[in-house]
Amino acid sequence: METGGRPSVGQVILLGASSAITALFYSIYRHKYRSVQALKEAKRFSLTDDLQAVLSDLPGKCVPYAVIEGAVTSVKEVLSSQYVENCRGVIQRLSLKEHKMVWNRTTHLWNDHEKIIHQRSNTVPFDLAPEESGGAGVSVRVVRPLEAVDLGLETVYEKFYPAVQSFPNILGHYMTGERPKGVQETEEMLKLGAAITGIGELVLDNKTIKLQPPKAGLCYYLSGTDFPGLLERQEGQMRWWRILSIVFGAATCVTLFFILRRQYRHRKEKHQLQNLQREFEESRARQRVQQEQHNEEEVRNPCAICLGKERSCVFLDCGPHFSATPATRPCPAQKLPHCRNDIARVGPFC
């Protein structure tokens, strides 16, 4: 409902929600757009012997955003898988997830739901070296790899432990709206020798070349995909967020258009009503003037019969009946107009 032509609460909520969602999606799209542009402008380096000399000649001995592709090599220690023999790597992530079905009271359907019960990550220092070095090339030390947004881990072990179901438990599940499915145990590793595309800040620290998280809000990547594939995937995500921004932006514009159109129609109807009211008041004023002029012409003691002339005579005898008929002329009527009795005599009105 509207009060005084104002938008309803539902319209305000719908417009605010669509505007907020549009702003959120557009912000994500702009972030993705900047990330894609930064990836396109990033300098690509090869792990060759002259890389150290190139960095030495640069201001600050660093490249703010660089692309390095190489194979994972250990520095000193390595991590061994807890479940797979002869599986070694430099990053290990152990996860324990709970899978359950949750009842949705709105759609009246059971929906899958995952919850991480426990997660632990282990890492040791490692380098990126040429995949086929043959004794040539240099290596790049990877710094703070867990901060990468796209960490190319491989799942080496996965096992699902289903929940034990019993009749009392099933009844309890339907009452609480949650039905456990089981627990999933997963081990992910960044294996030795894995091909990695590293994108970040490339720095020459003494004689060690380091790849570390970049500054200025740029994304840090350690992806198992090559650079063209990584760029294509980021561009796909950017296009997806752009489409969502356009769709919700159009919905916001349509909602605003209908609200403004309704406001315009309400103001137009209000203006027409004011014009009609003003014309009515002017008409009433003219009628009052005409009545005042007409009342000035009327007599103070109007005739009881015609109501248009002054009283000039009295009919008798049953009671005084005042008339406009002059007393000097014979009365045209033989009976009184009110009581229909015979007129006995006529006298002048004083």
Image (cartoon, grey):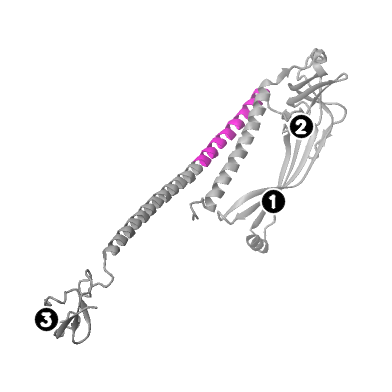
Location of residue 277 with respect to 50 vertically, above or below: below
Which three-letter amino acid code belongs to the residue tagged 2? Leu
In the rendered image, which residue does mark 1 sit on? 182
| Magenta stretch, main secondary structure class | helix
Residue 281 % position (x, y): 37, 56
SS under mark 3: loop
Which is nearer the N-term, disc 3 or disc 1? 1
Residue 334, disc: 3
Query: Image height check: is 275 above or below 287?
Result: above
Q: Is 6 situated left or right of 43 in this image? A: left
The residue to which callout 2 is attached is 190
Rendered position, 347 above or below 163: below
Q: What residue type is labelled 1?
A: Gly
Q: What stretch is highlighted in magenta?
A: 227-253
Residue 47, percent across and down? 77, 17
Numbered disc total: 3
Query: Residue 210 is drawn in which quadrant?
Result: top right
Of label 2 and label 1, which has the lower sequence position? 1
Q: Nearer the viewer, residue 199 or 293?
A: 293
The image quarter in which residue 173 lies? bottom right
Q: Which residue is found at the position 80% from the left and 12% from the top?
A: 50
